Amino acid sequence: MTLSDQEQYDVFVRRDTRYDMAFFMGVKSTGIFCRPGCPARTPKRENCVFYETADAALKAGYRPCKRCHPMNFPGQTSPLIRKLINLVESDPDRRWSEKDLIANGIDPSTARRQFKSRFGMTFSQYVRNRNLARAATQLGEGDKVIDAQLTAGFDSPSGFRTAFAKTFGTAPKKSKAEPLLVEWLDSPLGPIIVICDDSHLYLLEFTVRKNIQRQFERLSKQHKRPILPGRTEITEQIRDELIDYFHGDITQFKTPLKMTGTDFQQSVWQALIDIPYGQTRSYAELAASIGNEKAVRAVAGSNASNGLALIIPCHRVINKCGNLGGYAGGLDKKEWLLAHERQHA
């Protein structure tokens, strides 16, 4: 979507966050630049210039606004949470205590509160679940239970068995399934959940999607694998590709996928992937593309069951009359994504 300077200015007047990260406004009178939706008072039109990227605004000599933080994604993980996760990943064998956090300049109560708000668990719970995931991986590779117990940080064999069985639904010595690992990533449209193993991406969803917990349970049950916090190389790959996608630098994803669905659903999802970037199709056209023109309702149901948002681009399907139709992540996101892809196609 190409907007005139006046139309871009009107977006700032309305504080319309649907255009967040689509363009930026430099303010000549203050020397700062902002993102759409900035809460600061909108400057006079004659003092405003517009840029496609934050980098272009920076190169023009503008500095980031301290109120809307145009260099950051909305909902971006706080520096404290990033620091805590990096500490755990850099030294996974360590038993992190409150003293350790204080030694790293971190207030334990603040860490607990921010982790609870972001992930629904405390920092200590995150560390324990992460270590249990590593222990399960060891057992899946044939290591001894005692070695897995020590990896998980348990002095007591009974305590380890209890915690392991509660998490995985089986005793440690009977466990052969490696867990799927869940991580929270940031985007211009808010936090995204990704679930991966060492070779494939299983789920990518906006956190605001309804019944996201039910998707977790279905995924875990169908693959007979628990889902625990953690990262893999696939997590890093999809994170980098998402950054490139939202910057308009790529039109296709290369991260290997594991589609969890029926043969019919997977045929619909493959047809979605085949819709060219920057274009849309109606549900009827999508049904025709898989050779079943009468399956419009079933195609719509498969769209709704898609658990790999953006990568399997169900946002590119609209109603026959041209209306947006539905979108599990919210129609505001669907509208933003379509405008973004038209702009960069």
Image (cartoon, rainbow, N blue to C red):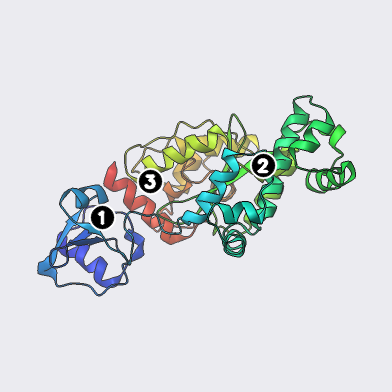
Quadrant in which the C terminus appears:
top left
Amino acid tagged 1: Phe
Lower sequence index among marks 2 and 3 = 2
Residue at horizontal 63%, vertical 34%?
Answer: 263
**Marks 1 and 2, how far apart in space?**
44 Å
Return the x and y of residue 39 as percentages of the image width and height: 32, 72
Amino acid tagged 2: Arg
Residue at horizontal 42%, vertical 47%?
Answer: 316
Lower sequence index among marks 1 and 3 = 1
The residue wearing badge 2 is 94
Residue at horizontal 78%, vertical 47%?
Answer: 167
Crowdedness near tag 2: few (<14), some (14–19) or many (≥20) residues, C-alpha within 10 Å:
some
The residue wearing badge 3 is 280
The residue closer to the viewer here, 306 or 26, is 26
- Name the mark nearer the viewer: 2 or 3: 2
**Residue closest to the far top:** 142
Residue 23, label in figure:
1
Q: Is residue 289 visible?
A: no
